[in-house]
Amino acid sequence: MTRGRSSARFFDPAGARFGIPTWPWRMAPPHLRTRRQLAAAGLRPGGQDVAGQVLWNSRRGGGGVRAAYLYDVRLALPKRTPTERQRAALAKALAARRICPDCGRDAGYVLPRHLGTCVDCADAPTTDKPIDIPAGPAAVMEVTAA
């Protein structure tokens, strides 16, 4: 089932026009999958070369032709599972992104980079600056009179 001119334009299973086998949207053979489709099945390409591509006309971002590369599911390998040490290192790194450098507490969210601190510390007035009190006898009289 082809859908208009664009589908026929991208049909090149021999790879004569595009250099690699090419199919229109939803017309690739069932044994060829994208990276996301492999990942959803718990697989990864495993170092194999691209086996083909899917091309389609896009309406996003000004249009144009978009591509998705395809890999042979028969040559795919299972996804790697991280070791316990890798998981612990990742958890430690993610926790460090939640610690405020000013107050030292866990904010419960990843700190915004543009603030560099938690929202409470960013909103709090700074008290480390000395208060500017004018010097002289007139200033002393104004302070005591009030």
Image (cartoon, rainbow, N blue to C red):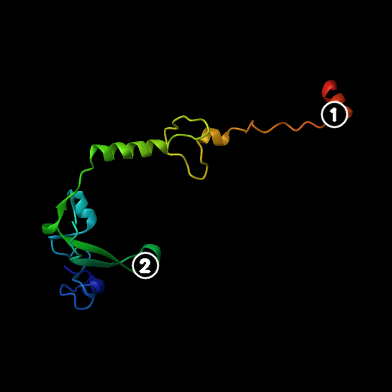
Residue ID at (35%, 64%) = 59
- Give residue 143's quadrant in the image: top right
Up-down relation of residue 57 to residue 146 (above or below)? below
Q: Is residue 24 left or right of residue 73?
A: right
Q: Quadrant of the C terminus?
A: top right
> Camera-side residue: 91 or 3?
91
User: Residue 83 at x, y = what percent?
Assistant: 23, 40
User: Residue 1 at x, y = what percent?
Assistant: 16, 67
For label 1, the crowd category at 10 Å Cα-Cα, with few meaning under 14, some 14 to 19 and many 20 or more, is few
Q: Amino acid at mark 2?
A: Gly
- Give residue 46's quadrant in the image: bottom left
Q: Residue furthest right?
A: 137
Residue ID at (22%, 71%) = 7
User: Residue 130 at x, y = what percent?
Assistant: 70, 31
Secondary element at image label 2: loop
First in sequence: mark 2 vs mark 1: 2
Q: Which residue is mark 1?
A: 139
> Camera-side residue: 135 or 39?
135
Q: Amino acid at mark 1?
A: Ala
User: Residue 133 at x, y = what percent?
Assistant: 78, 31
Up-down relation of residue 44 to residue 23 (above or below)? above
For label 2, the crowd category at 10 Å Cα-Cα, with few meaning under 14, some 14 to 19 and many 20 or more, is few
Q: Residue furthest left?
A: 74
Q: Which residue is mark 2?
A: 63
> Camera-side residue: 85 or 45?
85
Secondary element at image label 1: helix
Q: CA distance from mark 2 to mark 1?
A: 69 Å
